[in-house]
Image (tube, rainbow, N blue to C red):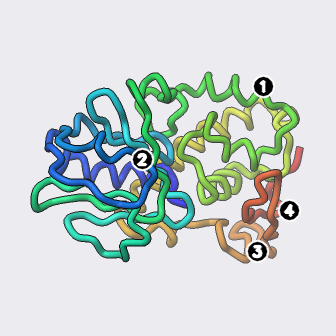
Amino acid sequence: MPEGPSILIIKEILDPVFTGKRITGVKGNAKVDKDLFRNKKVEAIRSWGKHLLIQFPGFTARIHFLLFGSYSVNEQTKPAKSLRLALLFGKKGVYFYTCSVKILEGDPDDFYDWEGNLLSKKWNPAKARKKLKAIPSAMVCDALLNQEIFAGAGNIIKNEVLYRIRLHPETLIKNIPPRKLAALITEARNYSFDFLKWKKELTLKKHWLAHTKKTCLRCKLPLVKKYAGKTKRRTFFCTNCQVKY
């Protein structure tokens, strides 16, 4: 599943090409009213967490790539059965495959809290802390994947952040010391921007310290691989240097 930085990159690719352009055709098997799009002009292309938002007058198309979604520009590269939505602009177009498409009526600012978006200029760490305090019995591995708190964070960000700050993934929020909680919030945002930089450089995997790794770089001991928390996502951690409070 693409994480927030990957969606922001897609937004940065599509925005200068299609914003301000008028749709000349639409196709795909998404269960949405395609007549909504016809002859409409794209007002903006934005990203919030793992959601790509294509804004039109009065409504927004929300694209969520789920586990295996993808896209292409100016040509259809996958079979029609996987094409959920194609927006055509004369000879150009954008094609979305194996993803979720939803129509949001009205202003997207009414649906999204930009202060909870890790890559937003409006990111509010104090609000993130308050939201964490409201779920004291949650494991930190689950809290980091909570899109209402850390919009855009996914499994890679979760594993790398917890390794960076030496925090055991099964630690309950209520047991995390205040300074460590502050480090969690700070590092979630810092790593998101590192992820973005490395993704653009095509070097992301080279910088992984814990995700999919077998040995702790600090302790030279085997890393544990576990499907931890309620989310049951793959978690890689060191029981020696990542403290469980």
CA separation in Å, label 3 and label 2:
52 Å
- Kindly identify the amino acid type of the residue bearing the numbered disc 3: Lys
Going by the numbered disc 1, the residue's amino acid type is Ala
Residue type, label 2: Val
> Which is in the foreground here, disc 4 or disc 1?
1
**Which residue is under mark 4?**
239
| Separation (CA) of disc 4 from disc 2 | 48 Å
Name which residue lies at 14% across and 43% down.
22
Report the mark closest to the observer, 4 or 2. Answer: 2
Residue 71 in the image: above or below residue 193: below
Residue name at image x 77 percent, y 68 percent: 219
C-alpha distance separating marks 2 and 1: 36 Å
Q: Earlier in the sequence, mark 3 or mark 1?
A: 1
Query: Who comes first in sequence, dot 2 or dot 1?
Result: 2
Give the camera-side residue of 198 and 50.
Answer: 50
Can you give x and y, in whole percent of width and height, for residue 68 in the image? 52, 67
Q: Which mark is residue 220?
A: 3
Alpha carbon of mark 3 to alpha carbon of mark 1: how far?
A: 36 Å
